[in-house]
Image (cartoon, rainbow, N blue to C red):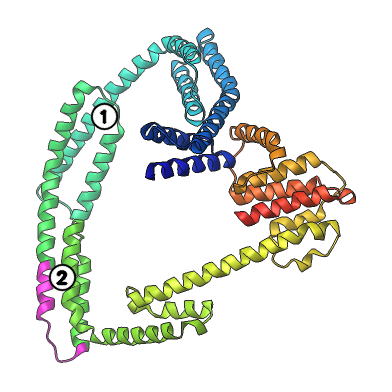
């Protein structure tokens, strides 16, 4: 039974993806459902019909995909054929152009149904021929590898000279780290080189770095020792007043900050010891923390009497208790209030949008629609002298598809045609957000509305649009 439920869920997800225009996700869910059907063996007839219907829809989109992309593949075949018949004068440009064509071919395979074997064989044969004039390019690349090897050798030589010059007195660790990083970046930038010489070059470079790495290690040990001594001094602080203790602690903290940082784990461990050793000097701060915690508890007891802005202002005052569960509880409550307020604004905006058709057709003052999205206010400037029922219907169906609800059965053929359009548009248009797509189609609906010819058909289409928006 569990596997049957999984099949039903996958088929549902597949159909939702197809309706939303996310074809590849729909096909993926369909394939997963078919695998489970094969493992299950026998399934109920009603479910079998649903699986077969979804499979047919998946194959339909495969056919649509081929219809949309095969002409583009033919164009790429013609492009590479042109390179075979008329090679570019510059072999490097020839190679770059072949790479670009191959990348476009791969992109089509990733975003749609893959090419047929016949198409692929033709494309590959022309690509192989197009590479023939690029022999000079590869000769040039080999020459560049030799040049890169020479530059790597020079960098290693410079590194050895730097070590010899500074070995009696190396600069501070910060300077050494930066210098070594520059040598490494420069050495790595000269690539590629021939495989047979790379290991030797790398070995020589590592050997040249070794004295600097050892010096960095030595300086790290010295810094670590000094920081451990500072921690011991903090533990020994015992003056008569809290202010004196804090002043001595802060001076030692300045001494600490003058030292270079150690590797992350060691630095973190020592810093924790340093801070812990000084915590005893901050009893006053702990008292203030307790005061804030008590105030925060009082706010939580009467939390319903505060507005969002008041709670946000109070939250900023509780800086010493920001890691407590009480602070998190207040923060979560504020987030919940903001979310509820946002939901209310969305509901009010949708209610005003529902009234938009009546305000437009009866030429009412849209200033009364105080919650209407600003994106729709330009609609009142339309001429409303063009009537296209077909375009208005298409806008309605597109919105239903975006919102993931079924259209009327009589509109099924039109919906399939729109699906084909959407698939084609994906190759030519930038992807819009769901909200932007809805805005575009609502505006398109009104662009093709004639206020002098408003009838039951137009009113019903608008009701369908609002129904779809409320369902999403």
Q: Which mark is residue 261?
A: none
What x and y, as percent, mark residue 65? 56, 27
Residue 109 within the segment the image draws in magenta: no
Which element is circle 1 on? helix
What x and y, as percent, mark residue 349? 67, 63
Which element is circle 2 on? helix
Q: Is residue 279 above or below residue 25?
A: below
**Label 1 crowd bin: few (<14), some (14–19), many (20+), radius 10 Å:** some
**In contact (CB < 8 Å): disc 2 and disc 1:** no
What x and y, as percent, mark residue 453? 89, 48
- The residue carrying mark 1 is 151
Of residues 276 and 38, the one drawn nearer to the viewer in this rendering: 38
Q: Is residue 284 above or below residue 58?
A: below
- The residue carrying mark 2 is 273
Q: Can you say which quadrant of the picture contains the N terminus?
A: top left
Among all residues in the image, which is located at the extreme right?
452
Q: Can you say which quadrant of the picture contains the C terminus?
A: bottom right
Q: Is residue 311 above or below residue 445?
A: below
Of residues 326 and 198, the one drawn nearer to the viewer in this rendering: 326
Q: Main secondary structure of the magenta part?
A: helix
Residue 230 within the segment the image draws in magenta: yes
Residue drawn where x is 43% and y is 71% of the image:
332
**Label 2 crowd bin: few (<14), some (14–19), many (20+), radius 10 Å:** few
Mark closer to the observer (2, 1): 2
Residue drawn where x is 56% and y is 32% of the image:
57
User: For the magenta stretch, what is the residue range?
Assistant: 228-242
């Amino acid at each position: 039974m569990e596997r049957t439920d999984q099949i039903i869920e996958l088929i549902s997800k597949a159909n939702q993806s197809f309706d939303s225009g996310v074809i590849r996700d729909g096909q993926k869910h369909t394939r997963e459902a078919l695998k489970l059907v094969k493992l299950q063996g026998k399934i109920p007839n009603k479910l079998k019909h649903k699986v077969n219907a979804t499979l047919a829809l998946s194959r339909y989109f495969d056919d649509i995909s081929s219809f949309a992309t095969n002409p583009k593949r033919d164009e790429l075949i013609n492009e590479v054929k042109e390179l075979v018949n008329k090679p570019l004068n510059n072999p490097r440009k020839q190679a770059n152009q072949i790479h670009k064509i191959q990348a476009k071919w791969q992109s089509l395979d990733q975003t749609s149904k893959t090419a047929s074997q016949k198409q692929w064989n033709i494309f590959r044969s022309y690509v192989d021929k197009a590479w023939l004039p690029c022999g000079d390019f590869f000769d040039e690349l080999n020459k560049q590898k030799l040049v890169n090897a020479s530059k790597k050798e020079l960098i290693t030589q410079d590194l050895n000279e730097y070590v010899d010059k500074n070995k009696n007195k190396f600069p501070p660790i910060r300077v050494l780290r930066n210098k070594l990083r520059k040598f490494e970046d420069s050495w790595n930038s000269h690539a590629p080189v021939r495989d047979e010489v790379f290991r030797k070059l790398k070995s020589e470079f590592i050997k040249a770095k070794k004295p600097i790495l050892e010096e960095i290690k030595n300086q790290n040990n010295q810094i670590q020792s000094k920081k451990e001594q500072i921690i011991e001094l903090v533990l020994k602080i015992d003056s008569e007043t809290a202010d004196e203790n804090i002043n001595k602690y802060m001076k030692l903290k300045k001494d600490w900050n003058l030292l270079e940082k150690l590797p992350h784990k060691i630095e973190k461990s020592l810093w924790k010891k340093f801070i812990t050793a000084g915590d005893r000097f901050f009893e006053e701060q702990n008292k203030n923390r307790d005061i804030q915690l008590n105030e925060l508890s009082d706010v939580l007891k009467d939390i319903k009497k505060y507005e969002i802005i008041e709670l946000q202002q109070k939250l900023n005052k509780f800086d010493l208790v920001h890691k407590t569960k009480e602070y998190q509880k207040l923060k979560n409550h504020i987030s919940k209030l903001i979310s509820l307020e946002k939901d209310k604004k969305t509901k009010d905006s949708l209610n005003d949008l529902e009234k938009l058709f009546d305000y437009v057709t009866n030429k009412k003052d849209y200033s009364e629609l105080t919650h209407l999205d600003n994106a729709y206010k330009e609609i009142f400037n339309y001429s409303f002298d063009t009537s296209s029922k077909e375009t208005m219907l298409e806008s309605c169906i597109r919105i239903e598809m975006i919102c993931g609800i079924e259209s009327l059965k009589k509109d099924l053929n039109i919906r399939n045609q729109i699906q084909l359009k959407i698939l084609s548009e994906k190759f030519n248009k930038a992807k819009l957000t769901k909200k932007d797509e809805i805005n575009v189609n609502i505006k398109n609906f009104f662009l093709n509305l004639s206020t002098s010819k408003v009838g039951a058909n137009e009113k019903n289409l608008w009701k369908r649009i609002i129904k779809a928006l409320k369902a999403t």
